[in-house]
């Protein structure tokens, strides 16, 4: 069993025991029925990338699509759908093919610091190289002033880095996360991002702490999740990231995943429809 599998199963059981059911008037299934949501406050998980890469084997996580999306946000700092190599964000695009002032757009805004003018990503890279024991290595995509011009309120909204004993550690904060599809997707993405920051600045990746304020499961997803956690479990695969290159030189081909065994389980499920913004 991979550590990611173990954590995922534990989270699911914890949510069933401690979560509470709510109805959101703005959410409907395609047949018009109200969506019931199992909501659990305060899920915190810790992953050590020195031990293994945190990808599920209970079901498949599309590793390279996850990589493509994290490069789009953190490296390209883009809000344009055409800059993304897949169609996962198409439904959120406006008439101009943009998600507005969200995610990558926020990371690309330049700010003034005592050391100079940087965007948030470049400031993290500067501090990792020049001031590695800083306790101010932080990036935040939740900008209240720009929410009205955003197609989505950021879910994974902040990242804090800390260097200890030659390793870069990270805390990912997430306001809300849907467990069937999004949970391991985001874990893999920020595991990859932690490796990119580490290797491009001469460090090893360390621990990643994932803090979810509101973890949720939709009622019609429960039978699928039940099947997922009863699936076979395999050892974690080998994920490697190219070392010795600049942060902005990373491409999808800079990453590889080997010996990835997972269950071929059908996890396709209907997604709720939001009736109003």
Image (cartoon, rainbow, N blue to C red):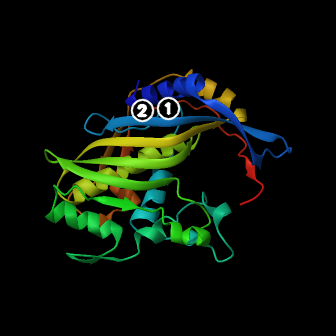
Residue placed under numbered mark 2 in the picture = 4
Crowd rating for badge 1 (residues with CA inside 10 Å; few <14, some 14–19, many 20+): many
The residues bearing labels 1 and 2 have C-alpha atoms spaced at a distance of 12 Å
Q: Is residue 208 left or right of residue 243?
A: right
Q: Is 226 rendered above or below residue 60? A: above
Residue 165 in percent (x, y) is at: 13, 44
Q: Is 213 rendered above or below residue 95? A: above
SS category of the residue bearing label 1: loop
Residue drawn at (17%, 63%), measured in percent from left and top? 129
SS category of the residue bearing label 2: helix
Q: Quadrant of the C terminus?
A: bottom right
Residue placed under numbered mark 1 in the picture = 262
Residue 177 in percent (x, y) is at: 55, 44
The single residue placed furthest to the front in the displayed view is 145
Q: Is residue 214 left or right of residue 223?
A: left
How many marks the image carries: the answer is 2
Residue 30 in percent (x, y) is at: 82, 46
Residue drawn at (31%, 51%), measured in percent from left and top? 194
| Residue 60 can be seen in this image | yes
Q: Is residue 232 left or right of residue 114?
A: right
């Amino acid at each position: 069993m991979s550590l990611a599998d173990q954590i995922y199963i534990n989270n699911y059981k914890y949510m069933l025991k401690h979560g509470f059911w709510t109805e959101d008037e703005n959410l409907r299934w395609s047949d018009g029925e109200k969506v019931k949501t199992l909501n659990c406050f305060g899920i915190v998980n810790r992953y050590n990338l020195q031990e293994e890469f945190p990808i599920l084997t209970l079901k498949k996580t599309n590793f390279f699509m996850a990589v493509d999306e994290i490069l789009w946000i953190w490296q390209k700092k883009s809000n344009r759908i055409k800059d993304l190599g897949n169609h996962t964000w198409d439904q959120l695009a406006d008439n101009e093919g943009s998600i507005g002032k969200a995610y990558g757009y926020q990371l690309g805004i330049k700010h003034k610091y005592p050391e100079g003018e940087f965007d948030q990503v470049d400031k993290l890279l500067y501090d990792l190289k020049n001031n590695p024991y800083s306790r101010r290595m932080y990036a935040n995509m939740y900008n209240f002033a720009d929410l009205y011009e955003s197609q989505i309120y950021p879910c994974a909204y902040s990242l804090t880095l800390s260097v200890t004993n030659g390793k870069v550690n990270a805390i990912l904060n997430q306001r809300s996360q849907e467990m069937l599809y999004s949970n391991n997707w985001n874990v893999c993405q920020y595991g990859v991002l932690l490796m990119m920051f580490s290797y491009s600045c001469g460090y090893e990746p360390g621990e990643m702490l994932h803090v979810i304020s509101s973890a949720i499961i939709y009622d019609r997803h429960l039978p699928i999740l039940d099947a997922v956690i009863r699936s076979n479990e395999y050892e974690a695969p080998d994920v490697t990231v190219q070392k010795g290159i600049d942060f902005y030189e990373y491409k999808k081909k800079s990453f590889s995943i080997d010996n990835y065994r997972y269950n071929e389980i059908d996890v396709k499920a209907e997604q709720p429809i939001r009736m109003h913004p």
